[in-house]
Amino acid sequence: MSKRPQTWHYGLVAQWWAEFNEAGPEIPYFQKLIECYGQPALDVACGTGRLLLPYLRAGLEVDGCDISPDMLALCRAKAEREGLAPRLYAQAMHELDLPRRYKTIFVCGAFGLGGDRQQDVEALCRFYHYVEPGGVLVLDNHLPYKNAWAWQYWVAEKRRQLPQAWQPSGDRRRAADGTEYELRLRLVHIDPLEQLLTLQIRVERWRAGQRLAAEENTLKARLYFKNELLLMLQQVGFGDIAVQGDYTEAEATAEHGVLVFIARK
Ligand SMILES: C[S@@+](CC[C@H](N)C(=O)[O-])C[C@H]1O[C@@H](n2cnc3c(N)ncnc32)[C@H](O)[C@@H]1O
């Protein structure tokens, strides 16, 4: 049996996502691509529906899948409040087992999470299988050098300083029900040979100065460079691959921190 990807989108982290992650340039960007390349579409790692829900509201036919039942439950609850009933599958992307194929499969902010390269290759194979002939996979990728915050630790001298200490206070926000959530992140380890980051998250929930709950969890994130992902996509069968930068239609350059691969089957 293959190892379960190590991710942290459960419990309080899932609640944080549902409360505070509802916007972003990704939403109109991916919507335009779905409208261009066609439906039905599949939102792989849809989370709490940041992209999926606006697309359903806009009348697009989009299914979702995610490894975390907690994220999916919050997505479903939000959808039901609006009278929407999305088809959601609790599946890891490397184990996709779905009843239909899609003209557009898209992945936003999730490829490489969990940490196993073989599973990432298997996920690409599953995407290829589930894209209809002539359809596309749209896959985003945060480049390893996007933020100095983590990139500086790729060199040995800096790496010896890991793990980072927890910050005394974190990002604190008030939820709709009046409780407050506080989130802290720290980098624990980088393996530059394997291009693997280990991060930890700590989320606390507070009401009126009293801590109601606290959770700590770990995420492994495997990082990829542009030409490496191009080769991987070609190896599983995709052709005619465009690479755009930072959720714009601009062709990718060295100035971009996020790449989007639009790969045709
Ligand atoms: C950063 S969130 C992004 C959610 C959503 N795509 C968005 O942009 O709002 C990452 C999501 O990927 C999911 N995820 C992580 N690893 C996964 C895997 N191997 N297979 C499927 N989903 C995964 C997590 O559960 C989480 O919901």
Image: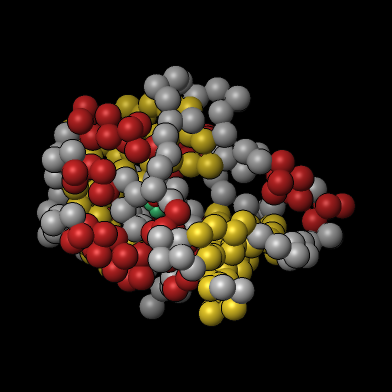
> Where 138 falls versus 155 (above or below)?
above
Residue 18 horizontal/vertical position (percent): 39, 59
Determine the image quadrant of residue 261: top left
The answer, for residue 215, to whether it is visible in the render is no
Determine the image quadrant of residue 249: top left
The quadrant of the rendering that contains the C terminus is: top left
Q: Residue at (51%, 36%) from the top-left corner?
A: 258
Please state if 96 lies on the left or on the right of 181 as rendered: left
Residue 109 horizontal/vertical position (percent): 44, 48
Q: Residue at (53%, 80%) from the top-left corner?
A: 212
> Where 22 falls versus 96 (above or below)?
above
> Where 177 falls versus 132 (above or below)?
below
The answer, for residue 147, to whether it is visible in the render is yes
Dividing the image into four equal quarters, which quarter contains ligand 1?
bottom left
Please state if 123 lies on the left or on the right of 204 as rendered: left
- The residue positioned farthest toward the top in the image shown: 250
